[in-house]
Image (spheres, grey):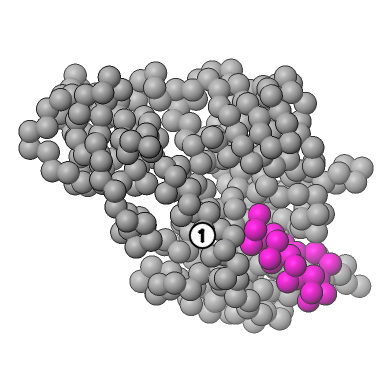
Amino acid sequence: MSRGTVVVGMSGGVDSSVAALLLKQQGWNVIGLFMKNWEDDDTDQYCSSREDLVDAVSVAERLGIEIDQVNFAAEYKDRVFATFLAEYQAGRTPNPDVLCNAEIKFKAFLDHALKLGADMIATGHYAQVRNRDGLFQLLKAEDGTKDQSYFLHRLDQTQLSRTLFPLGTLYKREVRAIARREGLPVAGKKDSTGICFIGERPFREFLNRYLPKQPGEMRTLDDRLVGEHIGLMYYTIGQRQGLGIGGRAPGDLAGHAAGTATQAHEGAHGEPWYVARKDVARNILYVVQGHDHPALLSDRLHAIDTSWIAGAPPHAQWVYSAKTRYRQPDCPCTLAAVDAGSCTVEFSEPQWAVTPGQSVVIYESQVCLGGGVIA
């Protein structure tokens, strides 16, 4: 007897393929859906969507399930890419994967699946959903090295109530082993990296197609000129590579070629240079020397555009833990000044290179509570 119909987002990778396999084995009526989210410059050189579609269809045939494809390129451009460009233009460093999950993979995709008659949707994300007396919680995956709850922290009760994460209790090596054992054609396929519209292309080259370069001064915090940058959007807080000022003491511009992509090697006193701050109004990039420079450490941050999975903010002053970037170890923290759209996060120890535009995600043990955009 079927447990109902589940539409699985199949990307052509091993994770979503094994997710579909497991759900079929559990008795679900499985329908695969391949999402196309990008059309501009969709070439085989940089974006593998054509190859991925072929792989997804091959897996569906192997599993004996129906598969369809849907084009969300217009929705992606309006809801994700427009924000992506606006954030970079404002001097921040956005995380489009977070927005893509909230707006495309668990909104546009969910709406489409429900129209197809689905009871549930599923993806190959490494995370878990738990129902506690009608409250749906997002939990970290069993495999801590693959946990993707950070990217899913903007999901709400409606989305989680309709979502299955079949891989949440598995380790990546187990997923690969299942794929090999069942003879899936993608068992040995390399994991995709980055987001499709950038792919493997040089990031600066891609961004320059949409946002014009705006060169400006590169200065130390005591306002000494040390070089020129090619545009604030090309740099992020804590960046070491590509500054083009390696080996130069502050104030020494001899031999400096503006905008070069050379690596920032050892600066004066044997310390490498790092991006510390951006002054968008004056178009100045501020840099410091040394990984542990005080300007790179923050014991608190302010977050805006907060989103809480339970539908309401967590209690202020309770001790939680937080990540300010993916794969970062959790750091104990407390929340202050929590309201409907913002909060202040205070850390038990200073955090390195807290970056405006990125997400801060709050946890209570293994439960992801939500988060916001670092302001």
Compared to residue 292, the image places residue 214 above or below, namely: below
Residue linked to disc 1: 81
| Magenta stretch prevailing secondary structure | helix
In the image, the segment drawn in magenta is 102-124
Q: Is residue 191 visible?
A: no
At x 72% / y 19%, what residue is drawn? 317
Compared to residue 245, the image places residue 79 above or below, namely: below
At x 57% / y 71%, what residue is drawn? 74
At x 73% / y 31%, what residue is drawn? 339
- Residue 201, how many percent across, how many down? 34, 61
Q: Is residue 54 visible?
A: yes
At x 34% / y 63%, what residue is drawn? 209
Compared to residue 253, the image places residue 71 above or below, namely: below
Q: Is residue 118 magenta?
A: yes
Q: Viewed as shown, does residue 366 lie left or right of 161?
A: left
- Residue 362, how many percent across, how many down? 66, 33
Q: Is residue 249 magenta?
A: no
Q: Viewed as shown, does residue 256 lie left or right of 35?
A: left
**Residue 320 vs residue 280, the one in the foreground:** 280
Kindly give the residue lying farthest to the front in the view shown: 281
From the image, which quarter does the N terminus lie in? Answer: bottom right
Quarter-of-image position of residue 42: bottom left
Q: Residues within 10 Å of mark 1 (few under 14, many from 20)?
A: some
The amino acid sitting under disc 1 is: Phe
Q: Viewed as shown, does residue 182 lie left or right of 53?
A: right
Kindly give the residue lying farthest to the left in the view shown: 254
- Residue 91, how many percent across, how many down? 42, 42
- Residue 291, how many percent across, how many down? 34, 25
From the image, which quarter does the C terminus lie in? Answer: top right
Q: Secondary structure at mark 1?
A: helix
